[in-house]
Image: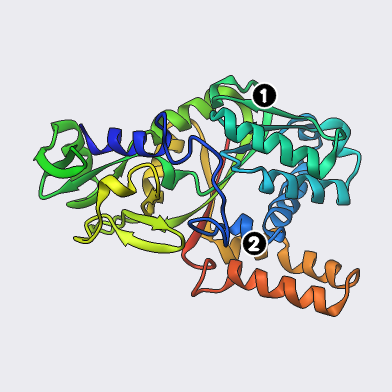
Amino acid sequence: MRFSRYMNEWLYGEDGYYKHFKAIGKSGDFYTAVSASRFFGASIANYFLSLLKKNPAYRNGWLIEVGAHQGYLLCDMIQWLYTCDPALMQTLRFGIIERQPDVQEAQRNYIKERFGDDIAVIHFNDIGEVEASYAFMVANEIFDAFPCELLKDEKIAIVENHHIMWEETPDEILQWAKSHHLKQGEIAVGYEEFAKAMSQSIEHGDFVSFDYGEKYVRNDFSIRIYRKHETFPLFDESLVLEKSYQNDDITYDVNFKHVAEAFIAAGFQEEAYETQARALVRFGLMEILEQFAKKTTQSVYLREIDKIKTLLSPTMMGDRFKMIHFKK
């Protein structure tokens, strides 16, 4: 089978890695910005507030997270919105796009733990189920979880019995690779369909997404496996795919140029593309910290500062992760 199908089964198949809820953080296979600090979500919510001030009609719209894991990010955003403007809880609607029933259940339990019955969050199994005149959609590390094809020397990867082999690349894929000057690396599958579905589901909206990658072709393989915070390149000779299959996370660096092309073709315009550190500062992270410092003890404040260093440090998430913002 094509590698993209193999990866899709790995992550989303009947016994796939994401089929059931997975721990993220110290007890899981990897960290995310969401698991590092609640100020990540607060900063994005603060930016959303600035958009609402410019467009009051959007106060009756939706806040939707795509692929919300346990729901930390959406809940952190709701908490900050309530802190700044409680009236929004009566006008905004909240949603999560998540197709795995077990993960939906974990999200419901966490949302109830945070807010009791005060906040209603609607689950959508697919982005195509959304119908909104306006929605602010947010995602963290979603594009790296799309399946991909692997290209090398004009050959494409196939998998048989958990062993990677190579065959001639179909002309359509080869032409795409040549037009993007890609000779070796990953080609994501599904960006175009995802962007079209989002465009069809909303009349107007903003989509803000964070992920790791660059806006150019590396011409090298970045695809790798995460297992309990250890990284294993897919082509590591010591790696046994059959053992990692559906048990470990598999991911790759995002080609943000490909993402942008897909969304622009679907009717969006690109508003911003920048490092995570620059985006969070622009969204108001420093001002939020100043407010927090006035309401807490120095020891608690210093603990939060240590967490935020993970989000902003160039050697950690600050530069490696990027934010891209599309508007329709």
Taking the image as shown, residue 250 lies to the left or right of residue 103, namely left
Q: CA distance from mark 1 to mark 2?
A: 27 Å
- Image location of residue 199, percent across then percent down: 53, 28
Q: Is residue 139 left or right of residue 186?
A: right
Closer to the camera in the image, 117 or 292: 117
Is label 1 in a helix, a strand or a loop? strand
Q: Residues within 10 Å of mark 1 (few under 14, many from 20)?
A: some
Residue positioned 17% across, 52% down in the render: 183
Question: Residue 291 at x, y = what percent?
Answer: 85, 67
- Residue 26: which disc? none
Q: Name which residue lies at 21% across and 34% down.
A: 2
Q: Is residue 169 left or right of residue 72?
A: left
Residue 124 placement (x, y as % from top left): 61, 25
Which three-letter amino acid code belongs to the residue tagged 2?
Answer: Leu
Q: Quadrant of residue 222?
A: bottom left
Identify the residue shown where x is 76% and y is 78%. Answer: 302
User: Regarding mark 2 in the picture, which secondary structure is present there?
Assistant: helix
Relative to 230, does residue 194 appear above or below in the rendering? above
Residue 186 visible: no
Return the residue nearer the eye: 150 or 243: 243
* Residue type, mark 1 in image: Ala
Above or below: residue 306 compared with residue 113: below
Disc 1: which residue = 132
Compared to 74, does 132 lie above or below? above
* Residue 151 visible in this rendered orientation of the protein: yes
Assign the N terminus to one quadrant of the image: top left
Depth order, front residue of 2/116: 116
Q: Earlier in the sequence, mark 1 or mark 2?
A: 1
User: Circle 2 sits on which residue?
Assistant: 280
